[in-house]
Image: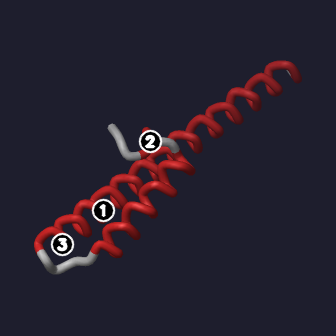
Amino acid sequence: MTGFIDRAKEQAQRGLAEGKKKIDEAHAHRAGSDLLKKLGAAYYAERSGSGSPEATREALGKLEAHVNAHGDGSIHG
């Protein structure tokens, strides 16, 4: 009986770990998408005359930091 309980605990722990990993990936993807949108908005504002190159560089830097931390899969589907 103890073996069954131990196996059930292990399966539950694996399930929790997999669920947490998927949630973390979803959060990273959402954050990456937001940073990509902000970069696009900063670039558009710069090109249309209402933004600055500094704002575009800052947005690009934040996106690059995110990609370095989470991989480029966090900004792609």
Q: Position of residue 4 (x, y in %)?
A: 80, 20
Which residue is at 23% across, 65% downward? Answer: 43
Residue sitting farthest toward the left: 48
Q: Looking at the picture, does residue 68 appear above or below residue 35?
A: above
Observer-nearest residue: 21 or 36?
A: 36
Secondary structure of residue under mark 3: helix
Q: Residues within 10 Å of mark 1 (few under 14, many from 20)?
A: many
Residue 5, quarter of the rendered image: top right
Cα distance between the residues tagged 2 and 1 = 15 Å
Which residue is at 59% across, 35% downward? Answer: 18
Q: Looking at the picture, does residue 28 appear above or below residue 4?
A: below
Dot 3 amino acid type: Ala
Which residue is at 53% across, 47% downward? Answer: 70
Secondary structure of residue under mark 1: helix
Residue 8: give its label.
none
Task: Return the disc, 2 or 1, that comes first in the chain's sequence.
Answer: 1
Q: Name the residue beneath numbered marker 1.
A: 39
Secondary structure of residue under mark 2: helix
Dot 2 amino acid type: Asp
Task: Return the disc, 2 or 3, that comes first in the chain's sequence.
Answer: 3
Q: Position of residue 25 (x, y in %)?
A: 49, 44
Cα distance between the residues tagged 2 and 3 = 25 Å
Are the residues flagged by discs 2 and 3 in contact, CB closer than 8 Å? no
Residue 45: give its label.
3
Dot 1 amino acid type: Leu
Q: Where is residue 17 in the image (x, y as percent from the top left)?
A: 65, 38
Are the residues flagged by discs 3 and 1 in contact, CB closer than 8 Å? no
Q: Name the residue beneath numbered marker 2.
A: 72
